[in-house]
Image: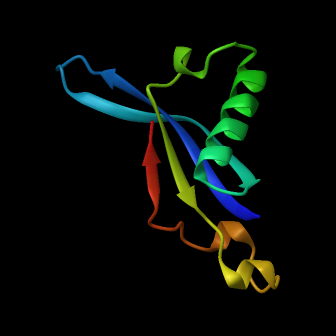
Amino acid sequence: MAHFTVRFLKNVIGDRRKSYEFCQRIVNVDARDATEATLLAQKQFCEFREIGDWSLHADRIDVQSADFPSCRSGALAPETVALGQTSTTL
């Protein structure tokens, strides 16, 4: 299984009508692919927020692969390695 970092992002308009994007939560999951990672993270996000639909608190989801060979061998902790470049937006 691969490791993914899933971010739930919310767009907010500031007082000067400038758009800002805020991360509502980061969920780390192990999954077969980005689709499964998204579904698992959505479930965890909803359970944490005690809601039925993740889109009540976020506008989009960003999925990044964080599966690195050095992490599997235990050489580095996952949080010390930069995130991968693959991104999926729903």
Q: Quadrant of residue 33?
A: bottom right
Asked if 14 appears above or below 27 in the picture, the reply is above
Residue 39: give x, y in percent of width and height: 67, 37
Residue 35: give x, y in percent of width and height: 60, 46
**How is the rendered protein coloured?**
rainbow
Residue 86: give x, y in percent of width and height: 46, 62
Find the residue positioned furthest to the right. 74
Image point 50% across, 25% down: which residue?
58
Asked if 14 appears above or below 71 in the picture, the reply is above
Quadrant for the N terminus, please.
Answer: bottom right
| Foreground pick, 17 / 53 | 53
Image point 69% across, 83% down: which residue?
69
Image point 77% across, 86% down: which residue?
75
Q: Is residue 44 left or right of residue 66?
A: right
Asked if 78 appears above or below 43 in the picture, the reply is below
Q: Quadrant of residue 3?
A: bottom right
Residue 79: give x, y in percent of width and height: 67, 66
Quadrant for the C terminus, please.
Answer: top left
| Foreground pick, 31 / 14 | 31
| Foreground pick, 58 / 32 | 32
Q: Is residue 37 left or right of residue 50?
A: left
